[in-house]
Amino acid sequence: MTFLDCVCVENMRQSDRKTIENHVPGLTLMYRAAMGVYRASEWRGNIAIAVGSGNNGGDGFALAYILKSKGIECRVITLSDKLSPDSAHFAEKAKALGVSALPYTDGVFAGSDIIVDCLLGTGFHGPVREPCAAAIREINAAGAYVVSVDINSGMNGDTGEADLAVRSDLTVTVAFVKNGMLAANAGNYMKRLVVADIGIVLDREENKIAAQWREEYAARGNVYPCPSYLDLCVIDTRDIEYPEKNV
């Protein structure tokens, strides 16, 4: 029987922090996450990667670095000047390879065949502020193939609630499914959801998703049936090492 872990945002945050402190450097985890996204999709045409602040944006810069290093052209669209240290590292690596980074303006996604959503992470809650709100509306209207990284920007990772969120063709969530992704409305935003296992050690077991539902699971209370949009084939990048992990 196959089970996948499903966790709240705080559990995910603590698991990530303790893994970095005790097991795997943060740069390696970010690189593995980006490799998971790279392996999850076919990359073609005009590729735009929309990045916000923090480590969710860092995943986007790391993806840009990976794509360019493999001869695949892409561009980064920035919505914030604030970067975490790991994000700044991959921003410089992508820039050194010739990846262009342009600030968001109206119409910047025009002509894109693929748009990667790295705007808002799992810790987001509340209303989406500008310019992210405008960017999300434009992404949804672009007619491109949309890949959301970790979570669809604008969705609450614990509840699945969203007044405005990216609608993706593919969502690659990092390490574990987030509780909000099982909410009744989550399927309105995600056509396909996959997990990238990057080697984060779970801080505490919480909920489980059963590949095949049995009635006895209902009595346990913490086991949930697999939603139709969740692909149970986990992308495993745990064996990947980032060469500059100690910088």
Image (cartoon, rainbow, N blue to C red):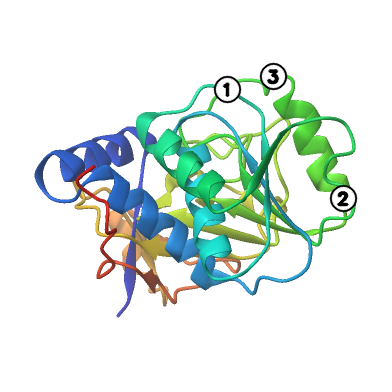
Asked if marks 1 and 3 touch (Cβ < 8 Å), the reply is no
Confirm whether residue 123 shows in the render: yes
At label 1, counting other C-alpha atoms closer than 10 Å, the crowd grade (few under 14, some 14-19, many 20 or more) is few
Judged from the image, the secondary structure of the residue bearing numbered disc 1 is: loop
Percent from the top left, x then y, of residue 13?
Answer: 31, 35
Which residue is depicted at the point 37% across and 49% down? 30
Q: For mark 3, what is the residue?
A: 129
Q: For mark 1, what is the residue?
A: 81
Percent from the top left, x then y, of residue 174?
Answer: 41, 53
What is the three-letter code of the residue carrying label 1?
Answer: Asp
Residue 20: image quadrant is top left
Q: Name the foreground residue: 110 vs 209.
A: 110
Q: Tell me if 145 is positioned left or right of 227 in this view.
A: right
Residue 171: image quadrant is bottom right
Percent from the top left, x then y, of residue 139?
Answer: 79, 45
Q: Is residue 242 above or below residue 228?
A: above
Q: Name the foreground residue: 1 vs 199.
A: 199
Q: Is residue 244 above or below residue 9?
A: below
Judged from the image, the secondary structure of the residue bearing numbered disc 3 is: loop
N-terminal label among 2 and 3? 3
**Nearer the viewer's eye, disc 1 or disc 3?**
1
At label 2, counting other C-alpha atoms closer than 10 Å, the crowd grade (few under 14, some 14-19, many 20 or more) is some
What is the three-letter code of the residue carrying label 2?
Answer: Ala
Confirm whether residue 60 shows in the render: no
Label placed on residue 142: 2
Quarter occupied by the N terminus: bottom left
Q: CA distance from mark 2 to mark 1?
A: 24 Å
